[in-house]
Amino acid sequence: MKLQSKRLTFTRFTSAELPLYLQLVTNARVMEHISGRALTEEEGSKRFEKALSFNLKDEETGNFMAHAREDGQYLGLAKLTVTNEGEAEIGYALLPEFWGQQYATEIVGYFVGYARQLKRFRRLFAIVDPGNPPSIRVLEKFGFKPYKEGEIDGLPAVYYELYLPAG
């Protein structure tokens, strides 16, 4: 499965792409707002197995690699993963050299539109570190609203949601 936005191509991760996934999760800057620290390769491999399990459960959604359409360069991860019937989590992680170039905005915009097109979801949600204002702005740009605060892996988290029109 291959999806495309204006500047990006999205293909679902397979077991062969573990090295690309590890580029993200072993990078301290990428993981600062996700886990608070870079993961070890062993931790990253375990997380990757979980990410792949979403790809096996559903043919239309999952964890995707994001590549530049122009030159095929790997930028990071985009996800739309089913969590419950009618509900999916949206998210992304980008390598630092691609921050500040509107790729996060493009990913969220594309996957909100894709979720609408699938007509399976009533609600999308995202989990954000409250210390990451750029990611909060991206979500709010698409109408996501905060609905609860909590923790993930011992780190503060704000949960955002977006309701999609029925049908």
Image: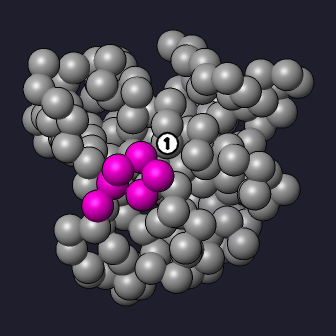
User: Where does label 1 land, which residue?
Assistant: 108
Q: Against 61, is 47 above or below? A: below
Quarter holding the C terminus is: top left
Task: Report x, y in % for residue 139.
Answer: 44, 55
Q: Is residue 43 left or right of residue 113?
A: right
Residue 162 in the magenta stretch? The answer is: no
**Residue depicted at x 55% and y 75%:** 132
**Residue depicted at x 21% and y 20%:** 119
Number of marks in the image? Answer: 1
**Residue depicted at x 15% and y 36%:** 122
Task: Please tell me which residue lies in front, 67 or 13.
Answer: 67
Task: Report x, y in % for residue 134.
Answer: 59, 66
Task: Please tell me which residue lies in front, 104 or 35.
Answer: 104
Please, which residue is most extreme toward the right here?
71
Q: Is residue 19 left or right of residue 150?
A: right
Residue stretch rendered in magenta on the structure: 140-145
User: In the rendered structure, which amino acid carries the disc numbered 1?
Assistant: Val
**Residue depicted at x 71% and y 74%:** 28
Task: Report x, y in % for residue 25.
Answer: 63, 61
Q: Against 99, is 85 above or below? A: above
